């Protein structure tokens, strides 16, 4: 398995050392998980959303590498104070990558997963509510699909492992 | 990208102590070795050993004497049995490709194990394109080769087998002699290669007793310089060159010999083998202190590989559960402790170390694995420091994980 050099940016290192918005929100309105421990890449987001559908508080927990921790942390920073509509539209993986000063290409998927997780949380909020706004597309976005794909990959790998064990 | 690294390095300023335990992936070269090498850059023997002038003859003499030392430590009696290569990767490529191509008329089947180094497994993949097939023998939960399975698959068609004497990640000492007997019983013509890089300087290794046909050793694995290794090829075994060019003193490897590196390799070998018992006991004492200390101080830890004397004395491989390995290597680095992980996150693909997967580790266990190797140059104070740092580093990473990913 080949390795790639990982020259993380100062911003990634700072967020890794002192993550912002780390830990559970006890009275979170919505919680969403993306990724899988089998991939070594998993995030939980906690969002506290008020009646005006503004994200009052956002926090995370992360089982993952430094890039995973940093991108999850920056997503909570970016989403905080935004309306759900703006969070949906403006928090993109490209912006997340920019905000952390860039990522090694093998780590792009970390930013994608973080955004996938926050989009899941927003979708879940409207599912719980029982009605969806017109700006929320029915079809899954790129980031949500990627999160699914990573989870599927983890399942496939785990299955393969089980088959190997049984042999 | 280089600017980023500068900031990363700056973040390490003010570290109290530094302990390098990543001797699997590269090593510090001891001053005694460097001092032995330096004169060969500009004072003597800087000539090409095949040319007819004093610096050339000096180089010839130096290379032959260095080779002789290495061959003696391997228990080889014939100097020509040693081919110096630019490292373990090149020696393994030469062993597998060279032996397969030179003996292809004898069979097209190659046997290896699921936990061989990737510079063996990838070469067997490549050889498939030339009509060879590979069977990877499974291993048990501690990494020991399934000899029953080996007995089933070894046959007259088997041209070559490659089984490392010691696994580089989990330190399992393989029953190479038994494996060799099984294979030679089925077909005395089958060539047997062992990557002995992690055995050389750690366990007894004698080509006369072992009777393998080919064996790889590497300089940096015994704290010599990088960029030099050797392949032992038993007298009479046919191996093709895999690179073309000007041949000098090394019949199987073209190009101008790197005399200072060869001198460094020989010197590092001398240092590893003088007081061999004392060196090995010291590695083991420090490794045991490290592992025992981690188990005493932390819960949710598991050892990967054997626990007894079937494990090589310098290797410690531990999974820290609920702790992602790459994050932990960075956290430890910021505190001056340098280790590596079998986590997928430190690799290009999302799959963790193939060795940990092969011994049946769950992915979540493999992602939290940390590999450390002690050397005779570490001190007890070094290990005490590591044991102070690891629990707080693991605690911080586990704090970020929270309840995410807990089964």
Image (spheres, coloured by chain):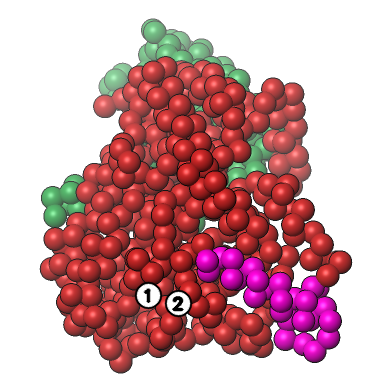
> Residue A127 at x, y = what percent?
30, 25
> Residue B171 at x, y = what percent?
38, 46
Say whether marks 2 and 1 touch (CB < 8 Å): yes
Element type where label 1 sits in the image: loop
User: Which residue is depicted at the point 45% across and 26% down?
Assistant: B289
- The chain letter under disc 1 is B
Residue nearer the viewer, B134 or A144 = B134
Element type where label 2 sits in the image: strand
Residue found farthest to the bottom = B105
Residue nearer the viewer, B217 or A135 = B217
Magenta stretch: includes residue B64: yes
Residue nearer the viewer, B381 or A37 = B381
Instruction: Reply above or below: B127 against B71.
Output: below
Direction from residue B187 to residue A109 in the image, left or right? right
Residue B213 numbered tag: 1
Chain in red (letter)? B
Residue B23 numbered tag: none
Magenta stretch: includes residue B125: no
Provide the residue span drawn in magenta.
Answer: B45-72
Quadrant showing the C terminus of chain A: bottom left
User: Which residue is depicted at the point 75% across and 59% down?
Assistant: B37
Quadrant showing the N terminus of chain A: bottom left
Chain A rendering hue: green
Mark 2 or mark 1: whose residue is earlier in sequence: 1
Direction from residue B318 to residue B91 in the image, left or right? right
- The chain letter under disc 2 is B
Residue found farthest to the right = B43
Residue B233 numbered tag: 2
């Amino acid at each position: 398995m080949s390795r790639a050099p990982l020259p993380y940016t100062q911003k990634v290192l700072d967020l890794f050392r002192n993550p912002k918005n780390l830990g559970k929100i006890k009275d979170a309105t919505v919680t969403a998980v993306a990724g899988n421990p089998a991939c070594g890449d998993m995030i939980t987001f906690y969002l506290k959303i008020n009646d005006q559908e503004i994200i009052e508080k956002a926090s995370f927990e992360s089982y993952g590498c430094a890039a995973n921790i940093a991108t999850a942390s920056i997503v909570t920073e970016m989403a905080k104070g935004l309306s759900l509509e703006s969070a949906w539209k403006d928090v993109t993986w490209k912006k997340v990558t920019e905000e952390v000063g860039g990522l090694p290409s093998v780590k792009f998927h970390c930013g994608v997963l973080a955004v996938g997780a926050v989009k899941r949380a927003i979708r879940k909020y409207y599912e719980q509510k029982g009605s969806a706004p017109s700006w929320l597309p029915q079809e899954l976005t790129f980031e949500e699909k990627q999160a699914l794909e990573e989870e599927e990959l983890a399942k496939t790998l785990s299955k393969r492992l089980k088959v190997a064990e049984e042999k | 990208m280089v600017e980023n690294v500068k900031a990363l390095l700056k973040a390490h300023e003010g570290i109290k102590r530094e302990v390098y335990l990543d001797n699997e992936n590269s090593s510090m070269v001891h001053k005694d070795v460097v001092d032995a090498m330096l004169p060969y850059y500009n004072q003597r023997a800087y000539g090409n050993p095949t040319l007819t002038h004093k610096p050339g003859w000096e180089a010839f003499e130096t290379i032959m004497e260095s080779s002789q030392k290495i061959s003696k430590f391997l228990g080889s009696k014939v100097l020509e049995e040693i081919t110096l290569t630019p490292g373990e990767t090149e020696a393994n490529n030469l062993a597998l490709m060279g032996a397969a191509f030179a003996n292809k008329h004898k069979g097209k089947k190659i046997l290896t194990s699921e936990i061989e180094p990737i510079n063996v497994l990838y070469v067997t993949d490549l050889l498939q394109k030339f009509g060879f097939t590979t069977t990877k023998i499974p291993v048990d939960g501690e990494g020991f080769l399934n000899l029953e399975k080996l007995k089933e698959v070894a046959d007259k068609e088997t041209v070559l087998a490659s089984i490392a004497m010691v696994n580089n990640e989990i330190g399992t000492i393989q029953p190479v002699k038994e494996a060799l007997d099984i294979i030679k019983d089925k077909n005395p013509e089958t060539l047997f290669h062992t990557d002995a890089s992690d055995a050389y300087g750690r366990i007894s290794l004698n080509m006369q007793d072992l009777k393998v046909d080919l064996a790889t050793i590497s300089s940096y694995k015994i704290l010599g310089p990088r960029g030099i290794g050797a392949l032992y090829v038993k007298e009479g075994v046919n191996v093709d060159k895999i690179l073309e060019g000007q041949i000098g003193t090394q019949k199987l490897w073209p190009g101008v010999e790197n005399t200072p590196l060869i001198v460094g390799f020989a010197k590092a070998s001398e240092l590893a083998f003088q007081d061999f018992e004392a060196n090995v006991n010291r590695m083991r004492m420090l490794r045991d202190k490290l592992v025992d200390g981690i188990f005493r101080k932390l819960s949710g830890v598991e050892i990967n590989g054997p626990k007894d004397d079937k494990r090589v004395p310098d290797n410690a491989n531990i999974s820290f559960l609920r702790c992602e390995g790459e994050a932990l290597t960075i956290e430890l680095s910021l505190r001056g402790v340098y280790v590596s992980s079998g986590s997928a996150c430190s690799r290009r693909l999302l799959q963790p170390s193939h060795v940990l997967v092969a011994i049946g580790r769950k992915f979540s266990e493999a992602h939290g694995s940390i590999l450390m190797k002690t050397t005779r140059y570490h001190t007890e104070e070094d290990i005490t420091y590591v044991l102070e740092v690891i629990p707080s580093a693991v605690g911080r990473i586990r704090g970020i994980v929270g309840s995410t990913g807990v089964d």
